[in-house]
Image (tube, rainbow, N blue to C red):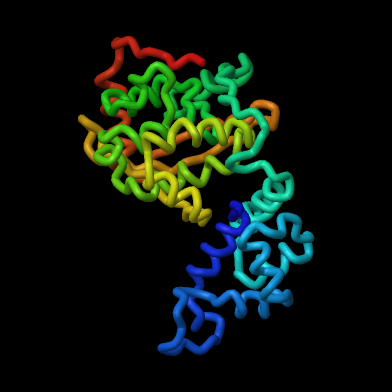
Amino acid sequence: MGTPLGDFIRAARDRIQPETLGLAVGERRRVPGLRRSELATRAGISVEYLTRIEQGRDRRPSPSVVNAVADALSLDAAERDHLRYLTKITDGGVCAGSSRAAAPPSRDVRPGVRQMLDLLEPAVAFVTNRCGDVLACTRGFELVMRGVGLLEAAEPNLTRYVFTDPRARTFFLDWDQVADERAFDLWLGPSLESTEWFIDQLTPLAGDELTHRLHRHLTPPTAVLGVRHPTAHELRWDRETLELPRADAQQIVVLLPADADTALALELLRDDARGRPLRAVTG
């Protein structure tokens, strides 16, 4: 049985173009990227050892081996962090099918975090976790998300919305990019137990669109978030994320207009909404 660590290494190996490393590309090459033997040679380990890691038969590679594999795969900083994280959870044996009790993440938001959110008004901002729960938001966020289906749920969740609500495919200009981001974020918490619980809940509804992204383990590139607003047409946002203390396992995400047209459209939305009550999302 494989592991997330083995899945990641195989996916990273497959995406490498051999010619970029000075390796010959001939008709007899039967794999899309780097051969296992080529990666083992570059990392200075045996093919047998690499095979055991990829197949999940060796769950405790040393830090020096992990670093050597990262170097051999030419991973960037974010990918190296993810590789170390997958090594940690594989070493602990906590992954799909583990015996530890799965449980949903807490939806509580500290009063101090809510005060910070109030100070951000009229910005477009929300409190979330890596599962995608929308735990609290500014009036500006509700204004932008009005009528698209996300906040109408009893417990709004961005990841569930992306994978199960047909409106999401119209709302997001690049749905695949957003889906990749949401699936990748699941590996980052809030905890292994909550990730397992959420994946178990979502997989029967999302199907292959979720599972093939979970097993790919490739870090999505940073990109502008484009949405198709019901009345303001296309809006484009840069995203800034403030990580809250580890005990919270939450983030504050702020959407900033990425161009002048979006900034103008946001002001028009605010002008139109003045005097109209907005519902606050509560945990």
Q: Is residue 265 above or below residue 226?
A: above
Locate residue 77: give its quadrant. Answer: bottom right
Q: Is residue 225 left or right of residue 120?
A: left
Q: Position of residue 29 (x, y in %)?
A: 46, 83
The location of residue 251, given as percent across then percent down, is 57, 32
Q: Is residue 150 above or below residue 97?
A: above
Q: Residue at x 37, y 34 (%)?
A: 205
Q: In the figure, is residue 175 to the left or right of 280? A: left
Residue 162 shows up from this direction: no
Q: Residue at x 59, y 74 (%)?
A: 36
Residue in front for this viewpoint, 182 or 118: 182
Of residues 158 and 261, the one nearer the viewer is: 158
Seen in the image, is 153 located left or right of residue 234?
A: right
| 121 relative to 232, above or below | above
For residue 270, say whether it is visible. yes
Left or right: residue 229 versus residue 258 is left
Residue at coordinates 51% horizontally, 32% vertically from top-left? 198
At which x and y percent is residue 128? Answer: 52, 29
Quarter holding the N terminus is bottom right
Tell me what residue is drawn at x 75 percent, y 60 percent: 61
Point out residue 116 in the picture as x, y percentages from the top left corner.
58, 22
**Most foreground residue, 250 or 273:** 250
Task: Choose top left, top right, bottom left or bottom right for residue 65.
Answer: bottom right
Instruction: Count all numbered tags in the image, as a single digit.
Output: 0
